């Protein structure tokens, strides 16, 4: 038995801002499905300045909570969670949204796909099969993925997906400067600069009235594009 390899330690990082309405359902589902598969995991919730019962619900479900005093943005909250996972020596980290739009089964599929592979950043793409997504969402996400390609030369179908998996190398090396949603595109740029291997796999798009009200809209995309262009220009002239 001593010669058997230890199962990898998996960190599940969930940035959350006022998600009390749906958080318990998400955490119960994750715990049930991950336990069934005998995955060695810990859930790390980054409370990004919530004013509701997000923290209390997470702690009641046995989740490790890191809190930002003020709401600092999705990019900042994600970076906090991944930095903690790196410091604690996790082998793989995954991120997913707290609003319930990602299925536990898709997370598990990603964990299986990245283990033993040479992939450093694995993105769960809703656009490989976009059934279930509204036409507006499809257009917005494809548009941001196209802009990401034009600005940074990184070609993926779903640059804005919240379901991502990170290898040990990515945990150690991959950093970004953006604090808001534009970090999704900047992350791909930084991965390219580091020579990390990026890949995608198909996931289901789960949208409810709640998740639609919480997520990005196509007007936000304009601000994201402005921020990305500004950052690209700044680094061109540094």
Image: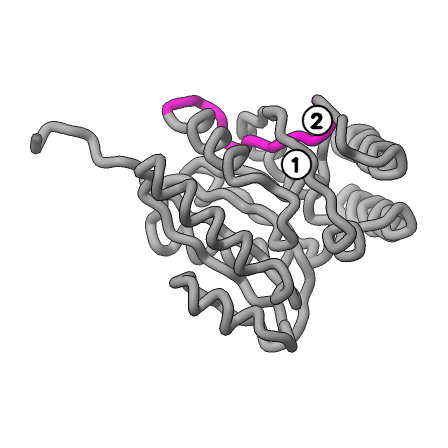
Judge by depth and name the residue closer to the eye, 107 or 226.
107
For the magenta stretch, what is the residue range?
116-128
Residue 154 occupies quadrant = top right
**Foreground: disc 1 or disc 2:** 2
User: Are the residues at dot 1 and dot 2 in contact (C-beta closer than 8 Å)?
Assistant: yes
Q: Pick whichever of labels 1 and 2 is earlier in the sequence.
A: 2
Residue 94 as seen in the image, left or right of residue 77: left
Can you identify the residue that label 2 sits on? 156
Quadrant occupied by the N terminus: top left
Residue 236 occupies quadrant = top right
Q: Residue at x 35, y 38 (%)?
A: 36
Q: Which element carries disc 1, helix, strand or loop?
A: helix
Coloration of the structure image: one colour
Residue 228 as seen in the image, left or right of residue 106: right
Quick check: is 107 in the magenta stretch?
Answer: no
Residue 114: x and y, percent?
A: 45, 28
Q: Which element carries disc 2, helix, strand or loop?
A: loop
The answer to whether any part of residue 35 appears in the image is yes
Judge by depth and name the residue closer to the eye, 47 or 147.
47
Quick check: is 122 in the magenta stretch?
Answer: yes
Can you identify the residue that label 1 sits on? 188
Q: Residue at x 39, y 28 (%)?
A: 115
Tell me if residue 232 comes above or below residue 3 in the rendering: below
Number of other residues with Cα within 10 Å of mark 2, as a class: few under 14, some 14 to 19, many 20 or more: many
The answer to whether any part of residue 238 appears in the image is no
Residue 148: x and y, percent?
A: 78, 34
State the mark number for residue 167.
Answer: none
Number of other residues with Cα within 10 Å of mark 1, as a class: few under 14, some 14 to 19, many 20 or more: many
Q: CA distance from mark 1 to mark 2?
A: 9 Å
Q: Residue at x 82, y 51 (%)?
A: 227
Residue 108: x and y, percent?
A: 46, 34
Residue 167 as seen in the image, left or right of residue 99: left
């Amino acid at each position: 038995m001593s010669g058997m390899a230890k199962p990898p330690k998996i960190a599940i990082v969930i940035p959350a801002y006022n998600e009390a309405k749906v958080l318990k359902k998400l955490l119960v589902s994750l715990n049930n499905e991950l336990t069934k598969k005998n995955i060695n995991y810990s859930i790390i919730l980054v409370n990004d300045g919530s004013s509701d019962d997000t923290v209390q619900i997470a702690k009641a479900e046995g989740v490790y909570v890191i809190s930002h005093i003020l709401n600092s943005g999705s990019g900042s909250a994600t970076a906090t969670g991944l930095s903690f996972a790196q410091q604690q020596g996790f082998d793989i980290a995954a991120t997913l949204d707290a609003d319930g739009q990602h299925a536990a089964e898709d997370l598990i599929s990603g964990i299986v796909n990245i283990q033993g592979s040479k992939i450093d950043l694995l993105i769960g793409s809703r656009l490989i099969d976009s059934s279930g997504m509204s036409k507006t969402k499809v257009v917005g996400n494809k548009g941001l993925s196209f802009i990401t390609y034009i600005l940074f030369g990184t070609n993926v179908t779903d640059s804005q997906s919240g379901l991502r998996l990170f290898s040990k190398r990515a945990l150690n090396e991959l950093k970004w400067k953006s604090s808001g949603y534009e970090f999704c595109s900047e992350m791909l740029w930084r991965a390219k600069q580091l020579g990390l291997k990026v890949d995608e796999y198909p996931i289901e798009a789960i949208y409810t009235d709640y998740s639609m009200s919480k997520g990005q809209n196509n007007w936000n995309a304009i601000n994201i594009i402005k921020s990305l262009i500004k950052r690209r220009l700044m680094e061109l002239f540094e």
